[in-house]
């Protein structure tokens, strides 16, 4: 009997040893796999953060890496605060500019309608000689290198496509609106438009990934991404244009913070004053004015009806910066994680995954259009 007990105990010890060995081996493999995956993820992020394709489709490093800076523990004041004496003075400057041409505003809206007819679009364009001339100059510029001169507005519209035409129309609209108070050089104007157009292109890719490209808010996100920095056109005409840069740390104070320190007002507040004066739809004014709020602790101060488009515009701005299409300094504000979660994205969602070859090719095409539009 004792022999049987000893045998049973011996078998039990052997069994337990085998189980222990199996579990330890499995744990080591899993730990090694996690470490390997984490290392690969970190390497991929570091690589993507400094990568973009060349014109030939191969990859190369950016001249400067883009630094992500966090202000998620700090609060941001509301761009819709009551009017101050300083605001009133700025409003007087804004009022010196012409009102937006209603027909071109209508055209901007039509171009985002997938059912829009080209004949209707050409008819509206033809009633505005400045717009017609602009489109023809762009399509005949070296950037598009036509085999023969394009003289038909309809032909030009076909060559450009609705998306590029929409960018041109809105760029012209905003240029008309800020021409009297903007004292920026052509290069500075080009840089601002380059970033705005890049943000609009990034918005398209973000909306596609989130399956929101045909949603009701997509036109708002496109338009606000393009115009999100419109306040900078006036603000930088007031004085020092490099308020956000310092010798020791160019990203210490991003524009929205540096402007506060230098002017006592930022481009988001100015955007609110400008867009409300233009009498743009309320959702556009609110979204543009709050576009930096998703990077601060009080991101929930964004009015609820505008929260989703505002977060999407902020993401588009960040993606444009990460792609190398930043305004002045190679840095971008990080997003508050709860603002990301508000879109229904889980904690593992990573904006770096959108830095694709397709995005960079789109950005190159957009840059070509802005180069042509601001050079003719």
Image (tube, rainbow, N blue to C red):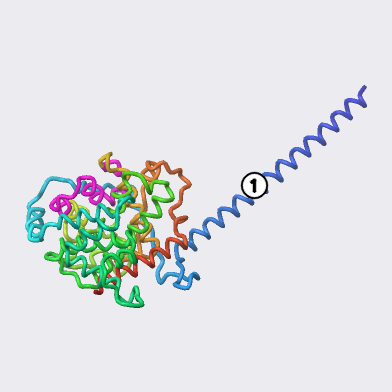
Quadrant showing the N terminus: top right
Which is nearer the eye, 97 or 25? 97
Q: Magenta includes 289?
A: yes
Q: Identify the residue at horizontal 26%, vertical 56% (top origin).
A: 228
Residue 202 placed where, x, y %? 37, 57
Q: Main secondary structure of the magenta part?
A: helix
Residue 341 left/right relative to 33: left
Residue 157 left/right relative to 268: right
Which is nearer the eye, 1 or 18? 18
Q: Disc 1 designates what residue? A: 30
Residue 182 left/right relative to 140: left
Q: Identify the residue at horizontal 52%, vertical 59% (top origin).
A: 44
Residue 56 placed where, x, y %? 47, 73
Q: Identify the residue at horizontal 56%, vertical 56% (top origin).
A: 39
Quadrant showing the C terminus: bottom left
Q: Magenta includes 80?
A: no
Magenta residues, start to end: 273-302
């Amino acid at each position: 009997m004792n022999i049987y007990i000893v045998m049973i105990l011996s078998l039990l010890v052997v069994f337990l040893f085998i189980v222990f060995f199996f579990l330890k081996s499995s744990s080591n493999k899993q730990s090694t796999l996690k470490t390997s995956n984490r290392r690969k993820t970190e390497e991929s992020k570091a690589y993507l953060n400094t990568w973009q394709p060349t014109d030939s489709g191969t990859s190369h490093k950016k001249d400067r890496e883009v630094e992500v800076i966090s202000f998620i523990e700090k609060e941001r004041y509301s761009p819709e605060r009551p009017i101050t004496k300083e605001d009133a003075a700025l409003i007087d400057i804004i009022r010196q500019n012409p009102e937006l041409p209603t027909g071109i505003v209508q055209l901007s809206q039509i171009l985002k309608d997938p059912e829009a007819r080209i004949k209707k679009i050409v008819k509206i364009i033809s009633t505005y000689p400045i717009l017609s001339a602009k489109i023809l100059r762009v399509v005949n510029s070296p950037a598009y290198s036509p085999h023969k001169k394009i003289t038909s507005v309809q032909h030009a519209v076909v060559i450009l496509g609705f998306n590029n035409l929409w960018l041109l129309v809105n760029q012209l609209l905003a240029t008309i609106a800020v021409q009297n108070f903007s004292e920026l050089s052509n290069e500075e104007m080009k840089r601002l438009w380059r970033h705005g157009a890049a943000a609009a292109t990034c918005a398209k890719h973000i909306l596609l990934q989130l399956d929101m490209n045909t949603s009701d808010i997509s036109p708002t996100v496109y338009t606000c991404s393009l115009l999100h920095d419109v306040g900078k056109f006036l603000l930088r005409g007031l004085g020092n244009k490099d308020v956000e840069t310092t010798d020791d740390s160019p990203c210490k104070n991003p524009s929205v913070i540096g402007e506060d320190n230098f002017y006592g007002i930022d481009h988001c507040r100015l955007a609110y004053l400008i867009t409300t004066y233009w009498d743009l739809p309320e959702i556009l004014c609110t979204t543009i004015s709050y576009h930096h709020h998703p990077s601060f602790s009080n991101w929930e101060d964004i009015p609820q009806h505008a929260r989703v488009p505002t977060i999407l515009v902020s993401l588009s701005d960040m993606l444009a910066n990460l792609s190398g299409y930043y305004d002045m300094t190679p840095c971008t504000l990080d997003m508050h994680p709860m603002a990301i979660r508000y879109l229904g994205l889980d904690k593992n969602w990573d904006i770096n995954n959108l830095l694709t070859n397709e995005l960079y090719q789109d950005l190159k095409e957009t840059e070509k259009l802005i180069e042509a539009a601001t050079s003719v």
